[in-house]
Image (spheres, helix red, strand yellow):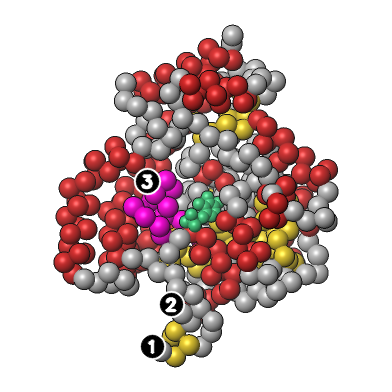
Amino acid sequence: MKKIQMVDLQSQYSKIKNQIDSKILEVLESAAYINGPEVHSFQKELEEYLNVKHVIPCANGTDALQISMMGLGLKPGDEVITADFTFAATVEVIALLHLTPVLVDVEKDTFNINIEALKKAITPKTKAIVPVHLFGQCANMEAVLEIAKEHNLYVIEDTAQAIGANYTFSDGTVKKAGTIGNVGTTSFFPSKNLGCYGDGGAIFTNDDDLAHIIRGMVNHGMYKRYYHDVVGVNSRLDSIQATILRIKLPHLNEYCDARRKAAEYYTKAFANHKNIVTPITSSFSDHVFHQYTLQIIDADRNALHQHLLDSGIPNAIYYPVPLHSQKAYADSRYNEADFKVTNELIDTVISLPMHTELDNEQLAFITKTILTFLNK
Ligand SMILES: *Cc1c(COP(=O)(O)O)cnc(C)c1O
């Protein structure tokens, strides 16, 4: 059996190696390393894939979030609501810009922002909501948009884990994750669903004015060379990463399918087990399974985690500490009773190997090892 990895980037690379290697050499020969034609072409191709007017590439997914908030003109003291159960990058940039992060609980079955908790957290200072499409599935965007409209709030979608996911509105309209709110952000970190071979990120919007502001902001606030109209940052996607992403983008749907196929195998194997809750796919969003995350009930999750590691099966606890309990983001205004779900999830979740290259032999071994351990 091929060695099981949490994410198998080597096997995926080996299938496109010839194309990748020769295109990288072309970029090296071209010497257009930053903002070259490869970056421009990737931007156009991603706009087409997402059916969005503007894609602005940048250096990573964290910058994408930060620059979106800068572009929207959020000011120190403005409150920004996001989910308590996410990677720290989401809340980090809010704090970094001296905005006030307001963390709220999530839904137990989808791990995404809880709509009632979101409503409860709104104050006159609230300016924006950052729904995170966690583990590859969209938050309830129709409800988020409704609340945003009622309270005149911006919506910034953190799509780092869900690029390619489709969201279906109740009227049947389908939109790609990240193109629903005022602005969407993503990451091309190697292990993400559309990963490059270094750091990379992008911002999506249908708003022409916002796109213009952000395009300058990613490049030192320059709209004309050496004229700095706003305070910007240096956050650019380089041409080598862009050429890699151009090769991988046409495979994204097939990559999502491969992840879904592995997820189906897992879910079928664990169906109706008394100790296992398998991830659900909600009615409004398909799932691109950035992570395949189980909840282990009435059994020793930590012992299972260790047993799998000892059996050569990598696995991870995403996330072991809710953001509201992190030293950097603790806030005396938080009340533990408001984080019932995240406080529970940190003790029950376990993410299994999930990538495009899992084969049935590996999946059979992983599921058998888990079931044998729990049925002991
Ligand atoms: C990975 C990730 C980010 C940050 O992306 P980087 O490219 O690593 O900066 C932001 N939000 C979420 C939810 C992520 O998973």
Residue tagged by mark 2?
219
Above or below residue 132? Residue 125 is below
- Judge the density around disc 2: few (<14), some (14-19), many (≥20) Cα neighbours within 10 Å: some
Which mark identifies residue 253?
3
**Magenta-span inclusion, residue 188:** yes
Q: CA distance from mark 1 to mark 2?
A: 10 Å
Assign a secondary structure to mark 3: helix
Total tally of numbered discs in the picture: 3
Residue tagged by mark 1?
225
> In this image, 342 relative to 283: left or right?
right
Q: Disc 1, disc 2: CB below 8 Å?
A: no
Badge 1 or badge 2: first in the primary sequence: 2
- Say whether residue 11 is visible: yes
Residue at x 50%, y 68% (from the top left corner): 205
- Residue 156: give x, y in percent of width and height: 59, 62
Badge 1 or badge 3: first in the primary sequence: 1
Amino acid of disc 1: Arg
Amino acid of disc 3: Asn
Please tell me whether mark 1 or mark 3 is closer to you in this view.
1
Q: Spot the residue most to the bottom.
A: 227
Residue at x 55%, y 63% (from the top left corner): 65
* Start-end of magenta stretch: 185-200
Residue at x 27%, y 43% (from the top left corner): 13
**Magenta-span inclusion, residue 325:** no
Amino acid of disc 2: Asn
- The answer to which quarter of the image holds residue 280 is top right
Assign a secondary structure to mark 1: loop
Q: Disc 2, disc 3: CB below 8 Å?
A: no
> In this image, 221 relative to 110: left or right?
left
